[in-house]
Amino acid sequence: MKGEILNILLVEDNPDHAELVMRSFQAHRVANCIHHVIHGEEALQYLFRQDIYSDPRASPRPHVILLDLRLPRIDGLEILEIIRSSPEIKNIPVVVLTTSKAEQDVAKAYSKHINSYLVKPVDFEGFNRMMEDLGFYWLAWNHYPWSE
C-alpha cells in the first residue's frame, strides 16, 4: 500500500480529541486522508454511502475506523454490531479510541470483534506518541487482504 492514499474514518464527537488525532497524523506524515464524523448516525451514513456520502469517490472505504465509544445518536458498541453484521464492511479494521478504561467496555468491545482497544492518554506527549505508533502500524505496516 506504499504511496497509496490511505483512508481513515474518525468517529469522534469531541472536537479537541479529533483535532489532536488529525494534527498528530499530519505531524508524523502518515500518508492518509482522514474523514471525520461526529456521531454514530453519521458514521453509518458514511460507511453505507447514504445521504451526503452517496458518492463513493467522496466517501471511499476506510482502511481503518477509529471509533469512540461514547457517541451521540448511536453509540460505538452499536455501530460495531452493525459493522460486523454487514458483509460489505465487516472486514474493515476497527480500533476503539476512547477515554474509558472500564473493564466492561473493553470486554463488550472485544466481544463485538474490534481489532484493538486504545485508551487515550491524558498527556499530550503520550497521545502524540500513541497516534504515531497507531498510524504506522495500521496504515504502513499492516497488510490487508486487498493490498499487494
Image (spheres, grey):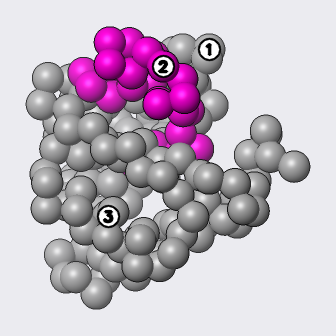
Q: Secondary structure at mark 3?
A: helix
As for residue 1 lying within the magenta part, the answer is no
Horizontal and vertical percent position of residue 2: 75, 62
Segment tinted magenta in the rendering: 41-66
Instruction: Tell me the residue that label 2 is attached to.
Output: 55
Task: Kindly identify the residue that appears in the image at 53 percent across and 47 percent down.
Answer: 7
Q: Nearer the viewer, mark 2 or mark 1?
A: 2
Instruction: Tell me the residue that label 1 is attached to.
Output: 87
Disc 2 residue type (three-letter): Asp
Q: Are marks 1 and 3 in contact (CB under 8 Å)?
A: no
Question: Does 24 sit left or right of 120 as displayed?
Answer: right
C-alpha span from label 1 to label 3: 29 Å
Horizontal and vertical percent position of residue 12: 24, 46
Pick the residue in front: 86 or 12.
12
As for residue 57 lying within the magenta part, the answer is yes
Disc 1 residue type (three-letter): Pro
Disc 3 residue type (three-letter): Val
Pick the residue in front: 114 or 104.
114
Would you call the spot at circle 2 few (<14 residues within 10 Å), some (14-19), or many (20 or more)?
few
C-alpha span from label 2 to label 1: 20 Å
Q: Are marks 2 and 1 in contact (CB under 8 Å)?
A: no
- Whichever of callouts 2 and 3 sits on the residue coming sooner in the sequence is 3
- For residue 21, the mark is 3
Question: Does 39 sit left or right of 91 as displayed?
Answer: left
Question: Does 139 sit left or right of 48 as displayed?
Answer: right
Question: Does 80 sit left or right of 69 as displayed?
Answer: right
Task: Kindly identify the residue that appears in the image at 43 percent across and 15 percent down.
Answer: 54
For this orientation, the residue located farthest to the bottom is 125
- Whichever of callouts 2 and 1 sits on the residue coming sooner in the sequence is 2
